[in-house]
Every structure is written in C-alpha cells, then in structure tokens.
Amino acid sequence: MQANLTPPTKRQLLELLAHSLSAHYADFSAAAASAGLTAMQAKTLTVLRGTPTSMRSLADTLTCDASNVTGIIDRLEKRDLVRREVSPTDRRVKHLLLTEAGEKAIDIIRERMEQVQAGLDRLSGEERNELFRLLTAVFPP
Amino acid sequence: MQANLTPPTKRQLLELLAHSLSAHYADFSAAAASAGLTAMQAKTLTVLRGTPTSMRSLADTLTCDASNVTGIIDRLEKRDLVRREVSPTDRRVKHLLLTEAGEKAIDIIRERMEQVQAGLDRLSGEERNELFRLLTAVFPP
DNA sequence: TATTGTTATACTCTATAACTATA
DNA sequence: TATAGTTATAGAGTATAACAATA
C-alpha cells in the first residue's frame, strides 16, 4: 500500500495547505451563512462555547485588537446569540455567555460543514489517527 | 512506533483542522504584512503568477463577486504590482499581468512563511508523503 | 440578448488612537 | 499607574444592484 515515491517538496506542501485552507474556509463560511452568520461570527460562537471568556481574552484568542471585539459582540448580542455580564469580582471585565440560541447555532453550523465532513469520511480510523498525529506535529497547540 | 489508540473523533479532527488552518493563515498574513500587503492581496498575486488571467476568472478563483476584484486590482495596480491589459481579441476582457515588483513580492512572502516551514521540517520524507496523501483525500483538488 | 467590467451602496472586519471606569 | 472595555476613524474585503461597452 505504501509507495516509495519521492516526498513532496516543501513548496508543494505549502500549496496544498493553501488549497486546504481555502476549501475549509469556503465550507465553514457556507455553513455559517446557512445560519445567517459571517465566518467571524461563527468562529466567535465556537470560541465562546464551554469556557467563560472576557472581552480581553476573546481578543487574544481571535488574535485581533480588543476594539474589534466590541463590534463583533455587539452584533451577536443584538441577535440574542451572546450575553455580556459584568464580573462580580472586577467591575471592569465582562463575561461573555452563549445563549441557548447561540448554542443551537453552533450545532447547525457543525452539521452543515458537508464538504469537510465528507472529506473526513473518506479516511479510515487508522488514517485519521495518522492525520491527527502529523497535523499536531506541524501545527503544535 | 504505531500505537493502537482509538482514532480521534470527527469533531476532534475538525477542531484540529480549524486550529491548523488558522495557524497557517496567521503565518501567511504575517508574511504578507512583511511585504506591506494584506492576505487577500498576497493570495491574488500568487493566483496571478504563471497563468494569464482575466478579471472574471480571477473572481472565480478567489470565489468572490466580480465587483470586489475591481477594488483589489485597483489597489495592487496603484502600487505597480499588477497591470491591466485590454485583450486584443475581446475588448471587454482585461488580462492581468504581474509586474516585476509583483513577482518579487511573491518570493519575499514565500520565504517568510517561517512558522510553517519550521513545522514541515519536523517531518521525515515519509511523513510528508503521508500528510500530502491524507490532505489530498480530505480536500480533493 | 448575454457577458465583462465598473460604479454606487451598505455592511463587516481590521488596526490605531483617544477616552472612561475601574483596579 | 495599569488594565478592561468603548468610541471614533479610516481602510480593506464582501455582496447586491444598476450600468456601459462589447460580443
């Protein structure tokens, strides 16, 4: 099964990564759009799922300026997908919480990432293991 | 070497893919910024490298509306990285050509994708082969 | 009639700088 | 003083709709 080909050059791998990135982003954007959201809004919801987060730490996670987060959260809050709550221990910070509608939106988006889902379905358990290992090596957490 | 672990769930792989691609995008953006360009401008230059392209087909490749391409090319042309040329065979279409400065910008960007380069160096030839195969399966051309 | 490219418009995302209210 | 969050501003990317020139 394993051929002894010359390995792809670094440039070829970079091009494949660029292609994969585009395909994944297109799929994610389409899934987000099907829930009436932009890619950034959808990503923000997934970041907020689980861990309680402040505006500051959200900006760090999204690697964007804190001033952007104000607008992003404004728009999500206006649609009742997210709530701001002033921290009881430090009145400067605001905790960000997903509403139920926000949780549901995430589920919808994840289900509708059809291209990537189909792509992953093409892999065996063994291959998924291997892809996981290799991606972790290239892009450490 | 090969452990018999349970394979990662699809959700775990989706999260790892999101993380990997976002790391790659951050690296690409930083490389583009080092040449004074946005990620979109840098991507446009790489699309234009090699194949002669019309505004229309560029819009298809970038999967965005044709009206956006006008602005993107306007900004690149203003900086002498790209030239428009009316097609001799169909006066409606414009061919897009990289200038020498545009070619140089691409080289600079490719050299500076250091994070990913370092990540790829962590893989053996055999592993690069395998990663190439798996990503192609998940994100077919 | 259909297609290529542009303009006008409106919205989102982006960074910078200046501000406020807390600590 | 330093930090969390906001506002104001300007630039870039995005889609939609209407348009001129050409096929």
Image (cartoon, coloured by chain):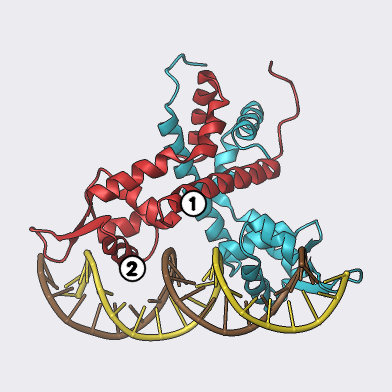
Chain colours: A cyan, B red, C yellow, D brown
Dot 1, crowdedness within 10 Å: few (<14), some or many (≥20)?
many
Q: Amino acid at mark 2?
A: Gly
Q: Position of residue B40 (x, y in %)?
A: 42, 57
Q: Which mark is residue A82?
A: none
Q: Position of residue B41 (x, y in %)?
A: 38, 56
Q: Splitting the image into 4 quarters, where does residue A91 fall?
A: bottom right
Tell which subunit mark 2 falls on: B
Classify mark 1: helix, strand or loop: helix
Dot 2, crowdedness within 10 Å: few (<14), some or many (≥20)?
few
Residue indicated by mark 1 = B29
Point out the tag, 1 or 2, that comes first from the N-terminus. 1
Q: Amino acid at mark 1?
A: Ser
Does residue B140 appear in this view? yes
Tell which subunit mark 1 falls on: B
Q: Position of residue A70 (x, y in %)?
A: 66, 73
On-image quarter of the C terminus of chain A: top right
Q: Position of residue A19 (x, y in %)?
A: 44, 43
Q: Splitting the image into 4 quarters, where does residue A109 fall?
A: bottom right
Residue at position x 42%, y 27% from top?
Answer: A9
Left or right, B23 with respect to B40, comes to right
Classify mark 2: helix, strand or loop: helix
Residue at position x 35%, y 41% from top?
Answer: B107
Question: Which residue lies most toward the left here?
Answer: B88
